Image (cartoon, coloured by chain):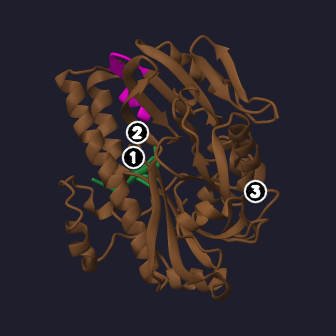
Amino acid sequence: MGNSLQQLADGISLIASADTWIEGNAIQQLHTTAKLSGMQQVVGMPDLHPGRGYPVGAAFFSTQRFYPALIGNDIGCGMSLWRTSLDRAKHPADKLEKRLGNIDGPLDDGWDEQIAALNLPHTGFESSLGTIGGGNHFAEIQQIDEIYDADSLETLQLDKRKLLLLVHSGSRGLGQLILRQHVDRFSHDGLPEGSAEAEAYLAQHAVALRFAEANRQLIGLRMLERLRAEGEPVLDIHHNLLAPTRVGEQSGWLHRKGATPSDAGPVVIPGSRGDYSYLVMPVADPCSLFSLAHGAGRKWMRSECKDRLSSRYTVAQLAKTALGNRVVCKDRQLIFEEAPEAYKSITTIIESLQQAGLIRLIARLKPVLSYKTHGECC
DNA sequence: ATGTTC
């Protein structure tokens, strides 16, 4: 087994096996971020792909300054995994789909007390709480497909006979507003640590993290209610965030953009809607900036998906995948943009992380029902 | 990514 940790240049590394798809432009963007003032180390994860100026699927460690633009607009985006009381044998996808119905709209008044108990500061984005959003966000009902580490599974109180729920969402319009206001004032120059401006951003960032976690919590509870099931979160982890961190001798700022923390317990690394997800135990390592891939990573740009796929598949065909799961996505544009073909194979991502010694597998999860949106748009 | 986008 070779090592997938590649040193690209001084302070720039990439975790990717030889057969992992990495776009040249994403490497270019990695070099761009490495040139930012105070940047000490950047690491591309195997799901690395180009973003708006800066790459997605990477971690960046700087000293003296930090860069809100590297975190992007979806501050606090992340994954929560839930165990449910649903017997997998008794709940086929069509039954789940029918029970779930449409969960795109705001939560009704019945949730007011529940929301108040979260004690979030007022942000003006309350009506987004409990909603998944667009882009690559989703909620997926899954089953345990293969077990590699039965002890860890038992510790997490996960039972093969019961369905799981995976929620991927973030801070919705709130993170977007925070980034926009920041960039309007400071462009992409970053902020000097300890300054009033830096403290102000960190305070907003902290609220966005709480909002995003609360959002995932409410999405999960809302889905469980619709599915007439009990359930609890097993884990919740952000993959877009800034954190003060010590790396070796240096104290500085760890930016994660589509990079899952490897120093915060077990995590799920999801594949596309047509692929498996993996529950893994991370091995914290400074060489990886204490981070992992946050998913499979895009292979195709959103803009090219429809052209490449519309002659091969009808919309109805895209509502089912090779693994047999059902896809709820009434948005004609989004169903092409999020097609399995648009993403890298999760196998290569997982193998890359294993080869670098960064994870131990706990279980492979298979999608049963992938929920994106009921909204008919475009 | 986006209480979006005539």
Q: Quadrant of residue A23?
A: top right
Q: Nearer the viewer, residue A97 or A377?
A: A97
Report the disc number at residue A76: 1
Q: Nearer the viewer, residue A259 or A30?
A: A259
Note whether A214 is above or below A2 in the view shown: below
- Residue highlighted by disc 3: A310
Please tell me whether mark 3 or mark 2 is closer to you in this view: 2
Q: What range is drawn magenta here?
A: A62-72
Note whether B1 is above or below A194 in the view shown: below
Report the disc number at residue A241: 2
Q: Which chain is green?
A: B
Q: Chain of mark 3?
A: A
Question: Residue at 54% across / 64% down in the picture?
Answer: A155
User: x and y percent of residue A36 in the render?
Assistant: 45, 14
Circles 3 and 2 on the same subunit: yes
Q: Mark 1: which amino acid? A: Gly
Q: Mark 3: which amino acid? A: Ser
